[in-house]
């Protein structure tokens, strides 16, 4: 079945780095754009980044621009989010989501990132 | 880019209909017919319920419907059921610089 599985979350100190992964299965990963969306504890959803199906274009929320990098390896059916210069306000559950026209149709279960000293 | 405005909570009795509003601006909700709605149960990932303002993905109950007027989109749940108790988020495309903006979220309670 169509599935997205995130990994790589954990506890990191302010200013530190972390790389999240999202393993896709059950669909032709290389044909679809992919997003990262995050949700701070007890808060709403926030779109973070998008990458086109072939990796040719990438877009970021202002809150992470210059610090986060989205990438993908279509040969491994995997999406990545490299997060540098992490701040306390980056603490959240990070979801990867598959692009469906102008929506997010498949979501992973999420991976928790905690930025704390 | 500010989050879209939703009521914090909406409640209804089983069998009733409720409507959740989602207010944005002409730069997002009013500018594109790309509003989507997501249902999120506690501790779970969001689930797509409506896309392109009023389209339902395969497998989503026809009790869920969407609409838009000007800068405000709406999600209506008819024949409210206990399993509909969840948080609901709207989302709109907001152009090539902002990309996507979500709503503040609405907690639906089935009385």
Image (cartoon, coloured by chain):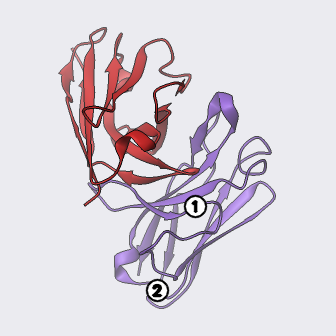
Chain colours: A red, B purple
Tag 1 subunit: B
Residue sitting nearer the eye, B12 or A71: A71
Q: Residue at x 54, y 27 (%)?
A: A61
Residue sitting nearer the eye, A37 or A100: A100
Q: Which residue is mark 1?
A: B51
Q: Residue at x 36, y 10 (%)?
A: A85
Check residue B13 in the rendering and tell me which mark sits there, or answer none: 2
Q: Secondary structure at mark 2?
A: loop
**Split into 4 quadrants, where in the image is the C terminus of chain B?**
bottom left
Residue B70 at what x, y percent from top left? 81, 58
Relative to A35, say whether B38 is above or below: below
Residue sitting nearer the eye, B36 or A56: A56
Residues at marks 2 and 1 on the same chain: yes
Q: Secondary structure at mark 1?
A: loop
Q: Residue at x 49, y 88 (%)?
A: B79
Relative to A35, say whether B88 is above or below: below
């Amino acid at each position: 079945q169509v599935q997205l599985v995130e990994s790589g979350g954990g506890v990191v100190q302010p200013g530190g780095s972390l790389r999240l992964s999202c393993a896709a299965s059950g669909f032709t990963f290389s044909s679809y754009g992919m997003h990262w969306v995050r949700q701070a504890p007890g808060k709403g959803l926030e779109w973070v980044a998008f990458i086109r199906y072939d990796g040719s274009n990438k877009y970021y929320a202002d809150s992470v621009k210059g610090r986060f990098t989205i990438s993908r390896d279509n040969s491994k059916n995997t999406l990545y989010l490299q997060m540098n210069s992490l701040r306390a306000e980056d603490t959240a559950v990070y979801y990867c989501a598959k692009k469906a026209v102008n929506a997010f149709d498949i979501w992973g279960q999420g991976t928790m990132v905690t930025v704390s000293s | 880019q500010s989050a879209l405005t939703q009521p914090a909570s909406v409640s209804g009795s089983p069998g009733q209909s409720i409507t959740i509003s989602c207010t944005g601006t002409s730069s997002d909700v009013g500018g594109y017919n790309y509003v989507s709605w997501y249902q999120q149960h506690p501790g779970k990932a969001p689930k797509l319920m409506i896309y392109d303002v009023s389209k339902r993905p395969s497998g989503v109950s026809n009790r869920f419907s969407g609409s838009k007027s000007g800068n405000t989109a709406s999600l209506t749940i008819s024949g409210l059921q206990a399993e509909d108790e969840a948080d609901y988020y709207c989302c709109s495309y907001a152009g090539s610089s902002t990309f996507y903006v979500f709503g503040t979220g609405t907690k639906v309670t089935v009385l």
